[in-house]
Each structure stands twice: as C-alpha cells, then as structure tokens.
Amino acid sequence: MLFGSYAACIGCHRQVETTPTGTIQGGTEVKEETLLIDGMSCEHCVRALEAALRALAGVDVRAVEVGRAVIAYTPEAISREQIMAAVEEAGFTCV
C-alpha cells in the first residue's frame, strides 16, 4: 500500500513503501509492519518518531532508524490510520 505526500526535515525527500505482515499471538491479532518514512534525515528525527510511536496505546516499537520504523500493533486497540496520523503529527510521512 502506498501513501504519497512529503514532509520536510532538513530537506530529505525519498519515496518508499510500507510492507505489512500479520501474525496471531494468543488468540489476539497482532500485525507487524515495517513503515518506510519520508522526511527523516538525522538522529533527532529518529528520537522524535520513536517517542510519537511509543506514546500510542497498542503499538510496540521494535526499531526506528532514519527512513524506517518496525512496529507491531493490535488492530483491536489502534488502527493503521491512527498510526499514520501520529507519524504525520510528528512531522513525517509514511509512503
């Protein structure tokens, strides 16, 4: 699934895509997803995005680096759209 718009952080603009996968744990659906993020260019960006994602109930942040975040989330607790909105509120774009 592609989401296309740009966010700026020190002028870095790249087009990337998300790659979702799903698993079932203990009868509760948990989706693991690698979010490819546009607009990240430095360690400050990494910390800002990680803090925004960790603030979301139902999201487990596995890794964040420039241009990418690996998360697991429970769709019963939070929707993918809510996660994307949090990324955008942090100043970045999932594409």
Image (tube, rainbow, N blue to C red):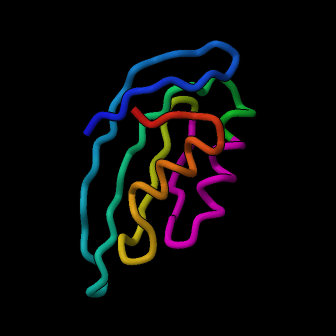
Percent position of residue 3, x then y: 35, 34
Percent position of residue 45, x then y: 68, 33
Residue at (39, 20) in percent of width and height: 15
- 62 magenta-colored: yes
Q: Nearer the viewer, residue 24 or 88?
A: 88
Query: Which quadrant of the figure has residue 64?
Result: top right
Tell whether 61 sits left or right of 8: left
Query: Which quadrant of the figure has residue 48?
Result: top right
Percent position of residue 61, x then y: 54, 57
Tell me which segment is drawn in magenta: 47-65
Where 23 falls versus 86 (above or below)? below
Tell whether 1 sits left or right of 67: left
Q: Nearer the viewer, residue 24 or 37?
A: 37
- 61 magenta-colored: yes
Report the residue that reaches farthest toward the right.
44
Q: Pick the quarter of the image with the C terminus.
A: top left
